Amino acid sequence: MGLSLATAERWVRRWERQQQRYAVDREERFTVIADVVEDTVAGRRPSGPLIVDLGCGPGSLAARLARRLPHADIVGVDMDPLLLELARTHHTDAARYVDAVIGEDGWTHALRLDRPLDAAVSTTALHYLAPDALHRTYRQLAALLRPGGVLVNGDHFPPDDAVLGDLAECVGRRHAERAHALAHEDWDAWWKAAAADPELTDLLAERRRRQPVAGGHSAVRLSVRAHERLLRQAGFRHAGAVWQYGDSHVLVAIR
């Protein structure tokens, strides 16, 4: 099911444009995540820091972290065979990629980590976990992180107040309109176009075979406050947002 580099590059470029529709100020959010990780790992180890990218997709965040932290060991984990193959082909040197379902039994063993993590990062991925599974995953990550290590999660977290939630969504939508992000193809259009590429046929067939694991989940909309409670219950000493635009946040938890 290997892809040519040209095909992987083309689909990753389209993925990057498509995702701008959904992640408010996406590049700034990536930058903030990298800032937090870089500050956390500065001077901590003679060897390279160890980072796991949860729900890595086609390697967007892993590649950016690899550029900022060229000596880091990055492990990207995802359950989507097509997106993983795009990452392995287009961002080959950025990370070691693992095919596993976050939150399922044994997923942390599949990472084959040889030392405690310095950081766990994620963008728009963990919202698919139900609260019980999210709490269990937070506990597992707390056990994998060294003391002082961080979990950094960039995602959409609605306010507890529904009226403020509507305003936060409005702020994000207006920002996307000004940046012309809504002119890009959307999620459904990207996957429909991918289905027409014969080089992706086998990977898409494998993706369908894994249904409903590789799709069909709906987002769980928990507020920052709800995540903070779950993180503290899971063993993190500090938890809170360090960046926000509309309902898009970067949430940090320190082990």
Image (cartoon, rainbow, N blue to C red):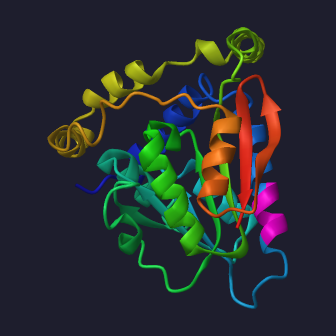
Residue at the location (75% across, 86% down)? 45
Q: Which residues are magenta?
A: 35-40
Magenta stretch: residue 233 in it? Answer: no
Residue 3 appears at what percent x and percent y? 32, 52
Nearer the observer, 54 or 186:
54
The correct choice, above or below, for 173 with respect to 149 in the image is above
Give the answer, above or below, for where 69 lies relative to 10.
Answer: below
Q: Describe residue 234's horizontal placement relative to residue 173 as left or right.
A: left
Quadrant where the image shows the C terminus: bottom right
The picture places residue 178, in percent across and down from the top left corner, at 78, 12
Looking at the image, residue 153 sits to the left or right of residue 188; the answer is right
Residue at 41% over, 78% down: 112
Q: Position of residue 253 (x, y in %)?
A: 71, 56
From this viewpoint, is residue 58 visible? no
**Residue 106 appears anywhere in the view:** yes
Residue shown at 79% from the left, 48% from the top: 32
Query: In which quarter of the view is residue 225 placed?
Result: top right
The secondary structure that dominates the magenta segment is helix
| Residue drawn 39% across the image and 55% down it | 103
Residue 254 image point, x, y percent: 74, 62
248 or 47: nearer the viewer: 248
Q: Quadrant of residue 158?
A: top right
